[in-house]
Image: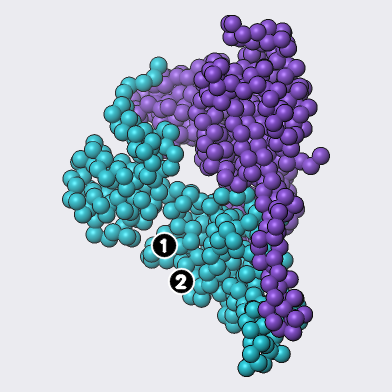
Amino acid sequence: MFVELFYLLRAYGVPVTVTEWLMFSQALAQDLAGSSLTGLYDVGRACLVKSEAYFDQYDQAFQHMFQGVETPQEIADEVWQWLADPLAPLHVSEEERRALLEALGDIDLEGLRRSFEERLQEQTEAHHGGDRWVGTGGTSAFGHSGRHPGGIRVGGRSMHRSAVKVAAERRYRSYRTDARVDVRQFEMALRRLRRLSARNQERPDELDLEATVRSTADHGGLLSLEYQKSRKNTVKLLVLMDVGGSMDPFVTICSRLFTALNRATHLKDLRFLYFHNCVYDHLFNDASCSTRNAVHTTQLLNELSGDYKLVLVGDAAMAPSELQARHGIIWWGQANEEPGIDWLRRLRRHFPHSVWLNTIVQAEWDWAYGHHTIAEIRRIFPMFELTVDGLTAAVSALMVRR
Amino acid sequence: MWYTARPVKAMDSTTPTYSGTADYIAAPDLMQTVDVAVALGRPLLIKGEPGTGKTMLAQSIAHALAKPLIVWNIKSTTKAQDGLYVYDTVQRLYDGQFGDHDVCDIAAYIKLGKLGEAFSHPERVVLLIDEIDKADLEFPNDLLWELDQMEFFIPETRQTVRAGQRPIVVITSNAEKELPDAFLRRCVFHFIEFPDPATMRRIVRVHHPDLEDGLLDSALESFYRLREVQGLQKKPSTSELIDWVQALAIAGVEPARISARMPFLGVLLKKDKDVEAARRDMAGGRTGRGT
């Protein structure tokens, strides 16, 4: 029964497996859902979806299956932004309400949905308090917190219960993990930077219980203690972070990553250095990139062995000359003899385990400002976006054994 | 005790249904999920913000179905083996050295863990595995077989501990670590949402039955407005609200002044930056915006 839902869920990106589907079928066979759609919704979600991160997709798939409502993602996402900041509820008297109803005539769902879609295609910006566009607090038939007696509610809370059809309630949107998040979530992603090894330990320092028992038994019951080498994390990390200029809008997310990294006490070594736009002859110990606190990049390469894992954080967006040209450095009074791209290639060669975390989200890499240099740098470093998912993927790329 | 309307379903008389208890208020979809887990004999995995009553749920299920509750608290050092059984080799060695016990009986040195206890219990029990995400990443995988088959083997005594009655297993997680897919596939999952104002009112009532309505109204209103403030690092949760309401009641703050002044803000917000953000939001207030 409902096998279509299984494929729909997978199409919406919910990782459902046959095991779970069988569990769901079993629940239906025992009539645990009763005969109601709500019951089916609850039981289905409990059996098929194992993370609140997928509830949103489940909602969409369920809606798709049982109401036949098309919910095209690319339209919805824009509209959500317009509606993020609603006006206070509008108060409309009974007469006005009646007048509106009359003006609308008979509510025709199909027509309403069609004009909703048309309106969405025409509309290019947020509107609040009006009577035509998709927005909040108005008397337009589309949007939320409004007073149109028979409109399509687009998200928000149902205040006046007059929405004929909930176009997209999608309450679990905020649980999606592709959104940007807080320090703790970064910390969790960084925890995976862990490789335990006893090789580098000099002397055994941990009681080996099994061996002690065996040895004690061998000695006819006289206690004989055996020790083993404890396992320590061997991961060493070098982080180079872009500061200033085009990075200013990303200051919050970078400081969150910085905090998370500094709290990551499990690493064997953590080095943190800064650069501006691109890496050249010097790297800097402080975020102001003053030459007093500079380190020669070559010296750093001599000092740090290739088993450090390298993470570059930056938007990778710069003028092509900054990356490609000799003397391309953005600062007056400094001249780099080798173009930045050579320095980047050198870093990549020296640190085989390296990634670039881009503060610009992946969806924009192909057309954002600096997309030329982003594409160039992607040829050198594996690039990930600076979100929880991106960081998790970056960490697994760093931990791959070569 | 309160009841909710829910679909009548054909249940055989042996299957108990769960509908919350006097001191625990469960949403209808949660009750449904509990019933599914109980009927299918699958572990129930509960996730949710801190303070949404994940741990309380197991107590409530045990109470409502009149079953004994066994709690296994997971710590970062907990191993799967600890839940099954521990073979006290040191004690046996010690006894062997002094010769005042019969050390031939290995079974005497096998101590069952919480999972073992739940399996060998003569009755059907509720087993709470609390905060499973605290343990090592591999921990849940180590329990797959045991939770699937509800049995395990003790090689030392060549014994199999098998559950006569499949325990009702409730597992809670704070989402600190992601759980392995193989483990998730075997669970029934429920995410406890943050309670809406109406539910919250009932929850606060459970803890403070004789609170003035006016105070509760404006405390709740301020509380939910505070949760909406942009840029909070840690949103206040249920337990903080309950403390805050208590503080307000003891200090005798007038309801009208709660939303304007937000007294005892420190009870709700535990971080400097959050307090700052809340104060800024209150000072700014809501001005006319829009097109």
Three-letter amino acid code at disc 1?
Tyr
Image location of residue B212, percent across then percent down: 22, 53
Disc 2 chain ID: B
Q: Is disc 2 surrounded by few (<14), some (14 to 19) or many (20+) residues within 10 Å?
A: some
Crowding around mark 1 (Cα neighbors within 10 Å: few <14, some 14 to 19, many 20+) is many
Name the one closer to the observer, A282 or A37.
A282
Q: Residue at x 60, y 63 (%)?
A: B78
Q: Look at label 2 and name its amino acid.
A: His
Q: CA distance from mark 1 to mark 2?
A: 10 Å
**Quick one: label 1 or label 2, which is nearer the N terminus?**
1
Residue B11, placed above or below residue A95: below
Is residue B248 in view from this perspective?
Answer: yes
Q: Secondary structure at mark 2?
A: helix
The letter of the cyan chain is B
Who is closer to the viewer here, A297 or A52? Answer: A297
Q: Secondary structure at mark 1?
A: loop
Which dot marks residue B63?
2
User: Which label number is shown at residue A113?
Assistant: none
In this orientation, does residue A113 appear?
Answer: no
Position above or below: B219 against B14: above
> Are dots 1 and 2 in contact, CB under 8 Å?
yes
Q: Position of residue A255 (x, y in %)?
A: 51, 31
Tags 1 and 2 on a common chain: yes
> Which label was assigned to residue B24?
1
Chain under callout 1: B
